[in-house]
């Protein structure tokens, strides 16, 4: 494996970006917002499955139109998560959403644009005090997200109910690892010996997952530097939005930690110190060995990446 976040690897898109003309988007705004007009638009970067369009207005705040392509059924769930977290966690403000606007004929969410850059674009340029402060704020944000608890792990329906339960703790982890390692593409890429070693490593550490936490939490599912916006500098540096909640589920908080502490963040002592301190301010039950547990949990993501047909050869 490389020391890079797989989110930064050159993955191909699962589907082509959703392309529409100025006139179509202008009619979309006029239809939904009763006379609102479009001054210009552009396709935003990031994301490999859905399309986000920046819609510029002649007057007032710009907006972002999110078009659901990978799995249109995730729209209502993502809206429900954002609505639940509004006022507690920095998330975009939703203006309107629907299954079909009558103009574009695709599931959509229209929200106000949030100022900021993705952390991945700025992290290397932050100084030590900024990285510490960023870690502190993200720790508090993660703890606020994870404060939403559920009776069991699993995938949500559009009402944020666990509709597809999964085994939690060590049993659930080993079940998923076995499922992933049995995929032919994974075995071909990693080899039988490495698959066996990975399975043994996870089995040796999985038992610790039964100790914390005592129930499933709301997990973002893709809580990495590519999905978090920051703005400002120095003492004014702040997180402005956590984006893309389509993979949210009820799971162990370690799922989000594992994603967040991939390099470069996980290699930076100031960021890691701030992250732990910020989380403990809200939830002091975070175990001492949380980094080891999080990295064990994140092995699932790496094994899954290895089985993707578009995975880079040097993964």
Image: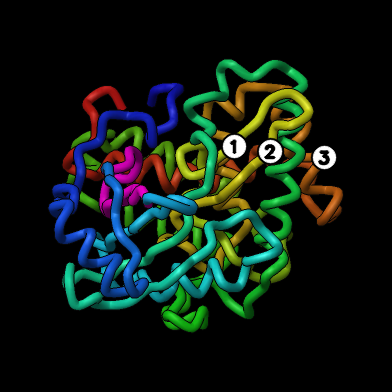
When the figure is inspected, residue 305 is found, relative to residue 159, above or below; the finding is above
Relative image position of residue 142 (x, y in whole percent): 67, 52
Mark 2: secondary structure? strand
- Please report the bounds of the magenta region as a residue range: 43-57
Residues at marks 2 and 3, CA–CA distance in whole angstroms: 17 Å
Pointers 2 and 1 in contact (CB under 8 A)?
yes
- Quadrant holding the N terminus: top left
Q: Which residue is mark 2?
A: 238
Q: Is residue 56 magenta?
A: yes
- Quadrant holding the C terminus: top left
Residues at marks 2 and 1, CA–CA distance in whole angstroms: 6 Å
Q: From where the camera sits, is residue 284 visible?
A: yes
Residues at marks 1 and 3, CA–CA distance in whole angstroms: 19 Å
Q: Which residue is mark 1?
A: 230
Relative image position of residue 293 (x, y in whole percent): 63, 45
Which residue: 78% across, 28% down? 235
Residue 197: image quadrant is: top left
């Amino acid at each position: 494996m490389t020391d890079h976040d797989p989110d930064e690897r050159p993955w191909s898109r699962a589907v082509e970006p959703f392309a529409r003309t100025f006139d179509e988007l202008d009619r979309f705004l006029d239809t939904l917002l009763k006379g609102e007009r479009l001054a210009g638009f552009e396709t935003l970067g990031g994301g490999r499955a859905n399309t986000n369009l920046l819609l510029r207005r002649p007057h007032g705040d710009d907006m972002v139109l999110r078009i659901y392509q990978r799995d249109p059924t995730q729209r209502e769930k993502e809206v429900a998560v954002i609505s639940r977290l509004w006022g507690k966690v920095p998330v975009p403000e939703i203006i309107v959403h629907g299954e079909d606007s009558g103009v574009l004929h695709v599931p959509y969410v229209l929200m106000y644009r949030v100022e900021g850059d993705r952390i991945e674009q700025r992290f290397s340029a932050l100084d030590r005090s900024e990285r510490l402060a960023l870690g502190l704020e993200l720790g508090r944000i993660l703890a606020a997200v994870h404060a939403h608890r559920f009776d069991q792990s699993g995938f949500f329906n559009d009402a944020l109910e666990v509709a597809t339960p999964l085994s939690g703790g060590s049993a659930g982890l080993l079940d998923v690892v076995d499922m992933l390692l049995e995929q032919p593409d994974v075995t071909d890429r990693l080899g039988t010996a490495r698959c066996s070693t990975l399975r043994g490593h996870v089995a040796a550490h999985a038992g610790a997952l039964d100790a914390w936490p005592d129930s499933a939490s709301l997990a973002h599912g893709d809580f990495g530097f590519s999905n978090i916006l920051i703005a400002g500098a120095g003492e004014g540096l702040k997180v402005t939005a956590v984006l893309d909640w389509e993979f949210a589920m009820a799971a162990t908080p370690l799922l989000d930690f594992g994603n967040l502490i991939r390099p470069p963040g996980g290699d930076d002592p100031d960021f890691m110190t701030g992250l732990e301190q910020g989380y403990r301010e809200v939830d002091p039950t975070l175990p001492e060995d949380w980094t080891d547990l999080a990295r064990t949990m994140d092995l699932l993501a790496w094994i899954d990446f290895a089985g993707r047909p578009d995975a880079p050869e040097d993964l």
